[in-house]
């Protein structure tokens, strides 16, 4: 049986309008960066590595001036993945797979702490991130300092069955970025839980069908959002949104299991 723990990968204060394209700027909200540990009989998989711990103590040094002015770091010292794993009695060396939903700074900040893990990233995501590093401008801001390390990156194309038994599957949910992916956990054949990551920031985005301002391709993102909504509303899966403050409040957090 697969167990799931919700981990805090950071707390960020930002303007609410960045989450909802139809909301006027001027209201600040604090949002969680949700990471997950999936414990399967064949190993532990970490979904996203959150914000790097340096961002809390030295935001400009870590994120640069522009990002540090947009985002206020509101994390407690233990709101980072290595401390969160320790709550479960685990160290980075215990993690077999790291799944990066995408390569924004708040989803791959802790990658460097997992030198012995295999990373699973969509090929389209890595290609786009490397093109940006190469100087090609696009509406997408990956963060070299976060992901560009000599790690074991295994690039996948579309759906990928993590443990080979259909119970933990990477789902392409492109749109927020060129190669964004979510993760589906099944119970036998039944979709049980989806870690949507930034394919859907909050329940409100899904319920009102509102896209955020930060995205790569709106029509592609809307298709991905519709596919996730179908998993929730038709297949009965529980969806974990990437950054939903209300959901975070009511979700059992590590060391307690989600389920
Ligand atoms: Zn993102």
Image (cartoon, rainbow, N blue to C red):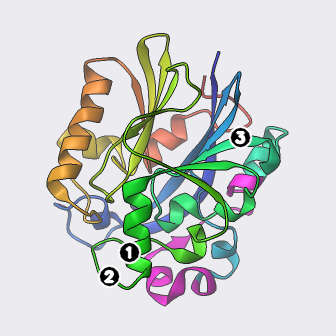
Mark found first going from the N terminus, 2 or 3: 3
Residues at badges 3 and 1 in contact (C-beta under 8 Å)? no
Q: Quick check: which quadrant has ligand 1?
A: bottom left
Numbered disc total: 3
Q: Quadrant of residue 127?
A: bottom left
What residue is disc 1 on? 131
Q: Is residue 195 visible?
A: no
Give the Cα distance between marks 2 and 3: 33 Å
Question: Residues in magenta?
Answer: 60-82
Q: Secondary structure at mark 3?
A: strand
Give the Cα distance between marks 3 and 1: 28 Å
Mark found first going from the N terminus, 1 or 2: 1
Q: In screen coordinates, is 154 left or right of 151? A: left
Label placed on residue 233: none
Instruction: Tell me the residue at 29%/73% (across/down).
Output: 26
Q: Is residue 259 visible?
A: yes
């Amino acid at each position: 049986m697969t167990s799931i723990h919700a981990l805090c990968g950071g707390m960020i204060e930002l303007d609410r309008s960045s989450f909802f394209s139809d909301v006027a700027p001027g209201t600040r909200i604090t949002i969680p960066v949700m990471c997950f540990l999936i414990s399967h009989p064949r190993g532990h998989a970490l979904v996203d590595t959150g914000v790097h711990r340096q961002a809390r103590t030295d935001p400009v040094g870590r994120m640069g001036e522009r990002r540090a002015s947009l985002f206020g770091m509101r994390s407690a010292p233990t709101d980072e993945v290595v401390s969160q794993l320790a709550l479960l009695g685990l160290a980075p060396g215990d993690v077999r797979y790291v799944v990066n939903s995408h390569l924004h700074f708040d989803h791959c900040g802790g990658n460097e702490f997992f030198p012995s893990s295999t990373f699973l990233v969509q090929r389209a995501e890595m290609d786009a991130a490397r093109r940006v590093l190469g100087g090609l401008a696009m509406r997408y801001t990956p963060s070299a300092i976060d992901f560009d390390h000599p790690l074991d990156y295994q690039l996948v194309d579309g759906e990928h069955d993590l443990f080979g038994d259909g119970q933990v599957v990477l789902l392409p949910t492109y749109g927020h970025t060129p190669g964004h992916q979510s993760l589906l956990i099944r119970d036998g054949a039944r979709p049980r839980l989806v870690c949507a990551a930034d394919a859907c920031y909050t329940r409100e985005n899904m319920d009102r069908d509102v896209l955020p301002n930060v995205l790569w391709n709106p029509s592609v993102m809307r298709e991905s959002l519709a596919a996730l909504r179908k998993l929730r509303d038709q297949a009965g899966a529980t969806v974990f949104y990437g950054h939903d403050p209300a959901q975070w409040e009511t979700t059992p957090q590590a060391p307690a299991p989600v389920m």
